[in-house]
Image (cartoon, grey):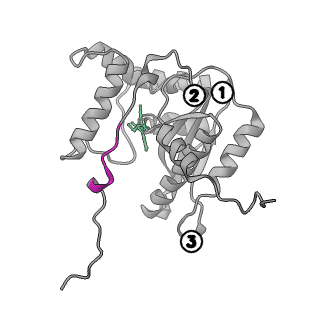
Amino acid sequence: MTDPLKAPVDPAALSALLAERRSVRGFKPDAIADDELHALFTDAQRAPSWCNIQPWRIALTKPPFTQRLTDALLHAANTSLPASELPFLVDYPPPYREHRRACGGALYQAMEIARDDKAGRHAAWLRNFACFDAPHVAVVSVERALGPYAYLDVGVWLGYLFAAAAARGISTCAMASIATYPEVLRRELGIPESQTILFGIAIGYEDPTVSANQCRTTREPIAANIQWFAEPSK
Ligand SMILES: Cc1cc2nc3c(=O)[nH]c(=O)nc-3n(C[C@H](O)[C@H](O)[C@H](O)COP(=O)(O)O)c2cc1C
């Protein structure tokens, strides 16, 4: 009998899982069982990091606290201007601009919002601050003093979390959007100024009846990202 601990994971199954994972922007209200959440974050905890410093710090909400957080975020989004702690581009250069447009276009098409429908786009943007009705929100921060390399570690952790969630039938959406109201997150979750708030993650079970969940994005062939080196240059 094969030792199950030594059997490799089926790469085709992993490829299918990674291909099927997508951002979900509409959730059922059902909370995830505590032991399942614990197992999910234990999987993500295996992420590698530089010198194994494990810098990700997570404030994780469960119902009914989640509602309190989204009420506060929605209030802020309706009454004040966003201001991220991390600078981000408004205007991307090509080819990133095209990727960004395609991604926004796919979402608005799924939600049946026309390009010139300002009110519709605003309502779609506000859905971020309701955290897409997810029962759980993870707010991810990192110790400011660790500098930008710690962001790489957090990105690796996020990839682990997404894959582990997909394997468990749990849906996710990263939300840089909610980090644009850091003072709300600090106040509600007690996150100290010494932590940079990076993003939130909506976590729960997909509601397939939400139109935004019809959104699908594509990827470039790997030739767009990889330059191969084989023959040593003369
Ligand atoms: C760090 C990060 C921040 C993101 N922030 C948001 C966000 O604020 N709002 C949103 O609707 N999607 C957000 N997304 C989701 C991306 O738009 C999505 O991952 C991308 O379009 C690819 O689509 P897919 O996840 O369905 O494959 C974010 C993703 C990442 C990795």
Residue 221 lies in the magenta stretch = yes
Distance of label 2 from label 3 (alpha carbons) = 34 Å
Q: Residue under circle 1? A: 65
Q: Which residue is mark 2?
A: 69
Asked whether disc 1 touches disc 2, contact meaning CB atoms under 8 Å apart, the reply is: yes
Tell me the magenta residue range. 218-223
The front one of 39 and 220 is: 220
Q: Quadrant of residue 33?
A: top right
Q: Nearer the viewer, mark 1 or mark 3?
A: 3
Horizontal and vertical percent for residue 6?
72, 63
Relative side of 122 to 213, left or right = left
Which of the two labelled residues, at mark 2 and mark 3, occupies the earlier sequence position? 3
Q: Residue at x 77, y 60 (%)?
A: 2
Q: Position of residue 204 (x, y in %)?
A: 61, 30
Check whether the beta carbons of the residues at disc 2 and disc 3 lie within 8 A of each other.
no
| Residue highlighted by disc 3 | 51
Q: Is residue 130 magenta?
A: no
User: Secondary structure under badge 2?
Assistant: helix
